[in-house]
Amino acid sequence: MPLKGIPQTISPELLYALASMGHGDEIVLADSNFPSDSIARVNGARLISCDGLPIPRLLRQILKLFPLDQYVAQPVALMDLVESDKKKGIDVPIWNEYKQIVGDNVQFEMVERFQFYERAKKCFAVVRTGEGAIYANIILKKGVIPKKSAKNEHDDDAE
């Protein structure tokens, strides 16, 4: 059963993972070609299935629930093109879509493919999606959610 204010694209398992993450924890939103199962298994990360969902749709909803880390220069990481694809001039339109969703003021880190895999092995969770775009994998670093001021601390209790 859905909850108020929680988008239906955010499954209970994903919601639990997002709420359990602490400041600086990272989560991978993996495209359908990413080795999600094997990457998650390495260090016991949660593998969350969001099969059928495109990453941009999921990204929009996740960013409504937690901020990106404002204490690092690049709180978002993308898997960079391999050298042969760079030479071919491969275009990755989904990156522009991510930048529109995240905002122009957020810097993206470009991470070499195998370094991206190694970093993903250390993530809190790996979210397997149905995204079919090439080079669509993205890592998000969770930021701090400030405590409400004492004056506003109990505003939620009144509802």
Image (cartoon, rainbow, N blue to C red):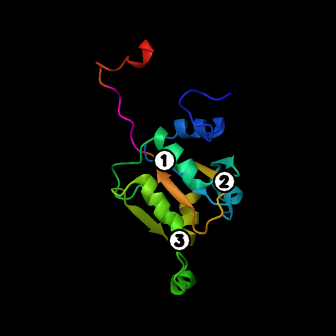
Going from N to C along the chain, the mark reached first, 1 or 2, is 1
Q: Residue at x 57, y 58 (%)?
A: 120
Q: Position of residue 85 (x, y in %)?
A: 56, 81
Q: Looking at numbered disc 2 in the image, what kind of residue is underneath it?
A: Arg
Q: Which residues are magenta?
A: 143-148
Which disc is residue 25 wearing? 1
Near-viewer residue (104 or 123): 104
The vertical placement of 60 against 112, above or below, is above
> Where the N terminus falls, by quadrant?
top right
Q: Are marks 1 and 2 in contact (CB under 8 Å)?
A: no
Q: CA distance from mark 1 to mark 2?
A: 18 Å
Q: Is residue 147 part of the magenta span, yes or no?
A: yes
Q: CA distance from mark 1 to mark 3?
A: 26 Å
Q: CA distance from mark 3 to mark 2?
A: 19 Å
Which disc is residue 128 wearing? 2
Q: Looking at numbered disc 3 in the image, what kind of residue is underneath it?
A: Val
Q: Position of residue 93 (x, y in %)?
A: 52, 68
